[in-house]
Amino acid sequence: MKKAKTSLIVFVIIIMVPMLLVGCKPEMNSDQSAKVWFNYIVKGDMTNLSKIGVTKEKANKLRQTQKVTYKNALKTGFESGNLKIEDKQTEQMYQAYIGGLDKVSVTTQIVSQTSKYSQVKLKSTYIMNTKADSQKTIAEATKQVKTLKLTNEKEYSTKVLKIFINALIKEYKNAKVSNVVKEKTYKFIITDKRWTPQDPIEFANDVVKTSLGQ
């Protein structure tokens, strides 16, 4: 389940980065660019995307790819445990997931910079919602369903799954944001007259994991 949450984010980054030679001054500073990248990858915020070289058309397409990938990963995860999750349930879980991440905030600061490279420190809060991912939640759901004394195995599994999914959705909807921040410094380079992460995939994975408190 946790793997499903982070594996999808790799797909968000495929719009980056045409490796072209550049020399002009970027429209946006590296720290500002880092914040735009973070907010788009983690929260789907499309504000100022054009200033980092991403069109809204591409952003929408990638967001849809992210959504489909996340939902497919959920289905695969449940099916590996012989549980069938409905499309409506995957949609509810996805909406709860991105709703939880929308509560995260970030600040950025330039640590050092040259004409071609920049070290940018990101400090971000994270959502605290690991409870519903634990085996304890599954055990509680199983215990609750056992009281119904169901004899049909399929019906039993469906009930357990529904309780678990509802618990996970509730956790995301009620997710609290940390009072402390996690920080890490990333290297940005100028590509096509704009500041972009030197390693986009690593950056994307890191910021999502950090936002989930991992």
Image (tube, helix red, strand yellow):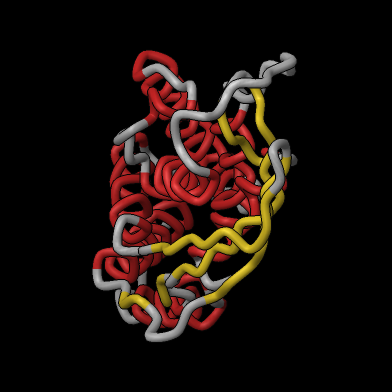
* Residue 3 position (above or below residue 63): below
Image position, residue 32 (x, y; %): 44, 47
Camera-side residue: 208 or 81?
208
* Residue 191 position (above or below residue 42): above
Instruction: Name the quarter where the N terminus is drawn.
Output: bottom right
Residue positioned 59% across, 21% down in the render: 24
Q: Quadrant of residue 131?
A: bottom left
Camera-side residue: 5 or 207?
207
Q: Quadrant of residue 102?
A: bottom left
* Residue 72 position (above or below residue 128): above
Residue positioned 33% across, 40% down in the render: 45
Camera-side residue: 62 or 92?
62
Image position, residue 209 (x, y; %): 59, 61
Image position, residue 139 (x, y; %): 50, 80
Is 2 displayed left or right of 100 in the figure? right
Is 15 displayed left or right of 201 in the figure? left
Residue positioned 47% across, 24% down in the render: 62
Q: Is residue 120 visible?
A: yes
Q: Is residue 151 visible?
A: no
Q: Quadrant of residue 89?
A: top left
